[in-house]
């Protein structure tokens, strides 16, 4: 079998792998990416879903990381205003915490480390006179409010993969890189697909973006020595019925130093997390423990007037973050910065260690700034001035207007599709941005959406996700491409899987078609 030749083989379909594939394809390199499961099926869909500078990292003097993340925060918000948006966070001041003046000084530093174009600054608030204070226990009277951003993390990964493919990259999900061999002139790899077929690849450069599996991939597949080890940190979250009826989020600090967020989620729920624990278990079977659920419920009950118990939890998720090993004693203190290990002992290889969603675009840019010249490519960095698919609400280039006037854009979509139920239209606008016109191409009435497979999921969307976004199972559709699993009810996954088996072609025949705008 003759191998497929490419400039770059990327192993890993999380935010770092898809971001690198996107940047490389946009610079004119031929790219192939393989992911052993679905896109964002592990760490990249198990975050706290924040685009943020990382206020707590100031406590550990990581000023460089915070500044880098704060700069990226607005770059990202402008690039995909449909799947991410500004959010105000309330921090109640609890007895035993640092003095209020010290917290205020930290927030001032957070405001000024990087230029803000559209996010309001922080301020002190009296919780008994503020909307967000009414849901807290009465003993909390003083607090602070500041700005960061929210993101649909799994969709961010998919959008990077979409953009990569539309710029020429080949994206193979459910495909394991089962063997690699290094030569002086390139890498030879065997990709094993879920159906048993294999693809041989010859690549000039290899990128190891396998996340928690990065060290394992280096040791097992390449026998290459590792100069940087990983610290695996499990973060778990719970989802409970809505604890408050407003758009503010909360940030709480536990006496043990860990930070927990309470975030409005999917209209009817509150997302609470994370836990930050060192992890040594099976990376394919990461799950929340009963102790973690109790921990998050207890912390929530310390602040909110409405108590919760483990019985109130409607959904949980856990992920393992591959952080750079450092000297931090506590998992919460481990650095979230990334490191790129360059290896030119033969054909070049780059391994990604650490990182966070907010700085993933910058990580990819730095990776390509090293890779591209090695491959004779001199194209400059470009992603800071490019929208992600669906983010071009007011033109091809990112603009603050898309963030500030998203509601006005949704009104235009409503005028184009007045027959869509408001809740469906709002979800489509948020999930797909301008690609909503592609999703609804040829539809002029509700009946054109096809049957409602489960509540909220119509056939036209399910087909779109399978044909355009690599969805293959109910879990892909209900929990990563959307969060309809929270709303659709018991048995919805079995219903969607049955529909997929009966109505769609095998995964290998779903043609990657570039959407028409």
Image (cartoon, rainbow, N blue to C red):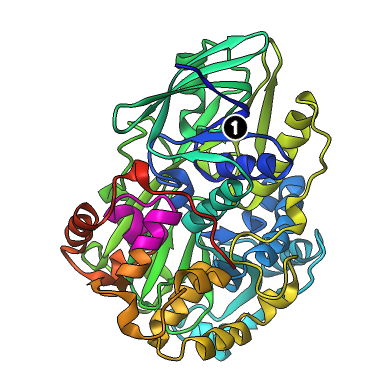
In the image: residue 62, left or right of residue 186: right
Any part of residue 259 in sight = no
Vertical placement of residue 195 versus 41, above or below: above
Q: Quick one: quadrant of the C terminus?
A: bottom right
Any part of residue 189 in sight = yes
User: What residue is disc 1 on?
Assistant: 353
**Residue 67: x and y, percent?**
76, 53
The residue positioned 52% from the left and 51% from the top of the image is 157
The residue positioned 66% from the left and 65% from the top of the image is 77
Nearer to me, 183 or 247: 183
In the image: residue 308, left or right of residue 47: left
Q: Does 479 appear in magenta?
A: yes
Which secondary structure type mostly characterizes the magenta part of the structure?
helix
Which of the 4 image quarters holds residue 457? bottom left
Q: Helix or strand or loop: what does disc 1 sit on?
A: strand
What residue span does the magenta drawing correspond to? 463-481
Which of the 4 image quarters holds residue 324? top right
């Amino acid at each position: 079998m003759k191998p497929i030749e490419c400039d770059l083989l990327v192993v890993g379909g999380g935010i770092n792998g898809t971001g690198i594939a996107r940047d490389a394809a946009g610079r004119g390199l031929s790219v192939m990416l393989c992911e052993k499961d679905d896109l964002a099926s592990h760490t990249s869909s198990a975050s706290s879903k924040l685009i943020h500078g990382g206020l707590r990292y100031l406590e550990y003097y990581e000023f460089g990381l915070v500044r880098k993340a704060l700069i990226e925060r607005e770059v990202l918000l402008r690039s995909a205003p449909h799947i991410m948006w500004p959010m105000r966070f309330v921090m109640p001041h609890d007895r035993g915490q640092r003095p209020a003046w010290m917290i205020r000084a930290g927030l001032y530093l957070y405001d000024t480390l990087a230029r803000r174009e559209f996010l309001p600054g922080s301020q002190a608030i009296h919780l008994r006179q503020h909307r967000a204070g009414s849901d807290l226990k009465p003993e909390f009277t003083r607090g602070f409010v500041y700005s960061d951003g929210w993101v649909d993390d799994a969709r961010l990964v998919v959008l990077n993969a979409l953009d990569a493919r539309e710029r020429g990259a080949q994206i193979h999900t459910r495909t394991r890189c089962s063997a690699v061999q290094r030569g002086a002139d390139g890498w030879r790899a065997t990709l094993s697909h879920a159906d048993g077929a294999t693809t041989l690849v010859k690549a000039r450069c290899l990128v190891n973006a396998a996340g928690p599996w990065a060290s394992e991939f280096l040791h097992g597949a390449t026998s290459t020595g590792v100069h940087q080890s990983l610290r695996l940190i499990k973060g778990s979250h719970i989802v409970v019925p809505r604890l408050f009826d407003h758009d503010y989020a909360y940030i709480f600090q536990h006496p043990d130093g860990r930070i927990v967020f309470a975030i409005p989620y999917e209209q009817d729920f509150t997302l609470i997390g994370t836990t930050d624990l060192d992890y040594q278990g099976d990376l394919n079977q990461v799950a929340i423990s009963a102790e973690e659920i109790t921990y998050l419920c207890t912390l929530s009950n310390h602040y909110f007037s409405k108590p919760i118990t483990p019985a109130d939890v409607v959904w949980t998720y856990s992920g393992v973050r591959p952080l750079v090993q450092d000297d931090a004693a506590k998992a919460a203190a481990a650095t979230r910065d990334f490191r790129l290990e360059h290896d030119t002992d033969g054909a070049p290889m780059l391994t990604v260690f650490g990182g966070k969603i907010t700085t993933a675009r910058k990580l990819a840019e730095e990776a390509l700034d090293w890779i591209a010249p090695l491959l004779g490519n001199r194209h400059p960095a470009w992603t800071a001035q490019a929208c992600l698919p669906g983010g071009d609400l007011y033109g091809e280039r990112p603009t603050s207007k898309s963030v500030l006037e998203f509601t006005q854009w949704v009104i235009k979509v409503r005028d184009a599709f007045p027959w869509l139920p408001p809740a469906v239209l709002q979800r489509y606008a948020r999930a797909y941005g301008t690609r909503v016109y592609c999703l609804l191409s040829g539809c002029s009435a509700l009946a054109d959406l096809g049957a409602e497979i489960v509540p909220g999921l119509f056939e036209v969307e399910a087909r779109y996700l399978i044909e355009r976004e690599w969805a293959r199972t109910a879990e892909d559709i209900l929990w990563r491409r959307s969060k309809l699993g929270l709303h659709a009810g018991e048995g919805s996954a079995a219903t969607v899987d049955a529909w997929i088996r009966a109505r769609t072609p095998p995964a290998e025949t779903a043609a990657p078609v570039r959407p028409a705008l």
